Amino acid sequence: MAKIIPQATILEKYFVTSTLPTQWCPGCGAGGIGHAVLQAIERMQLDPKKVVLVSGIGCNGHFTRHLRLDDLHVLHGRAPAVATGLKMARPDLEIIVIQGDGDAASIGGNHLIHAARRNIGITTIVSNNYIYGRTGGQYSPTTPKKSISTSSPFGLEDPPFELCNLMVGAGATFVARGTSYHIIQLIDLVERAIKHPGFAFLEVIAPCPTSYGRKNPETGITGPQMLQWQKENSVSIKKAAHMSEESLRGKIVTGILLDRIEPEYSAAYAKVRQRAQKGGLA
Ligand code: SF4
C-alpha cells in the first residue's frame, strides 16, 4: 500500500502559503485530487524543476496557482494541446494536465481525443464532478441523465459520455478511474499514470456539493454525503469482472481499466527528425 507523506511536508515543500486559502467551497473534491498529485510527485521523488502542471479553466485549474511548481493555466479546453506542444519541445519533462469534465470533455473534447490518439507522453487527470462548477452549474457532457442543473432545471435527457470508454476508443494506452473517497488508491493511480510512458488518462469522480449536490440530493448534498455515496456505489475492476451488466448499472468501476505499451509520440517524432536530417526514409 501507498506510503503517505505527512501533510506538513507537502505544505512546506509545494505550497506558496501566502496564496492560501483556496477559492474552493467546503467539501469540494478539487483539493483531494491536488493532494493526491503532490503525494505521488513526492513519493516518486520527482525533481520539482522537471514537473510542469498544465491546468484548464474551471474550479480544478485553480490548484496550480498555489504551488511552487511550474505551471501553465491555459485557454478553456486547450490544456492537452498546450501540453502536447510542451512535451514535443521538452520530452524530458513530466507534464501533468489537470482539468474538469466541462473543460476536458466539452470545450476541449477535440484536444483530449487527439492527445489520446497520438499517445503523447503526458498524464491527464480529469476531475469528473458531473457539472460546470465554476460557471454556475450548467450540465456538462458527463452529467447523468435526469440531473437538475441551471441549464436543465426540469431534468436532463442528454446521455452522458463514459469518459474512460471514450479514451480507450480514442487510443489512450493507460486508462484508470478513481474517486475522491478512495484517496489512498487515488495516490497509487496518479503514480501509475505518471510512470506510464504514453498517454495516461485518469478520471476521478469528485464531489461538487455547491453546483451539483444541492440540486441532486440522491448523490448527497454535502461533501461528506457525496463521498459516502461514492463509497457505497464504487466497485473495483476486479470485483466488476464477476458482476453482470445489469448489476453494474450506475456503479463506479475503479482501478486500472487499460494498460498497454505503444510507441510514444514525442519519441517517435524524434526518430522522424533524425531521418529527415539524414535525407529521408531510405
Ligand atoms: S463550485 Fe463545485 S467544483 Fe467549484 S469550488 Fe465549489 S464545490 Fe468545487
Image (tube, helix red, strand yellow):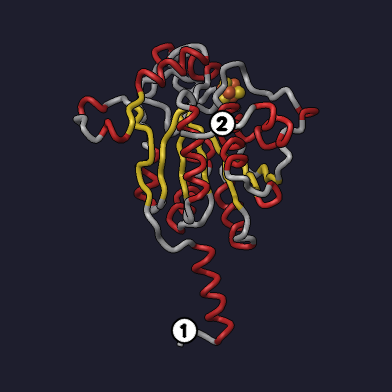
Q: Amino acid at mark 1?
A: Leu
Among the two numbered marks 1 and 2 on one chain, the one whose residue lies closer to the N terminus: 2
Q: Nearer the viewer, residue 121 or 280?
A: 121
Residue at point 57%, 52% (across, down): 81
Q: Provide residue 12's location: percent of width, then percent of height.
A: 74, 31
- Residue 261 horizontal side relative to residue 237, left or right: right
Q: Residue at x 36, y 46 (%)?
A: 258
Q: Pick the quarter of the image with the C terminus.
A: bottom left
Which residue is label 1 attached to? Answer: 281
Question: Is residue 259 left or right of 43 when viewed as pictured?
Answer: left
**Residue position marked by numbered label 2 in the rendering:** 4
* SS label for mark 2: loop
- Res 239 visible: yes
Is residue 76 in view from this perspective? no
Looking at the picture, which amino acid does disc 2 mark?
Answer: Ile
Q: Position of residue 242 (x, y in %)?
A: 21, 32
Q: Is residue 198 left or right of residue 210?
A: left
Instruction: Answer above or below: position of 76 versus 218.
Output: below
Other residues around mark 2 within 10 Å, as few (<14) / some (14–19) / many (≥20): few
Report helix, strand or loop for mark 1.
Answer: loop
Q: Which one is closest to the eye, mark 1 or mark 2?
A: 2
Q: Residues within 10 Å of mark 1 (few under 14, many from 20)?
A: few
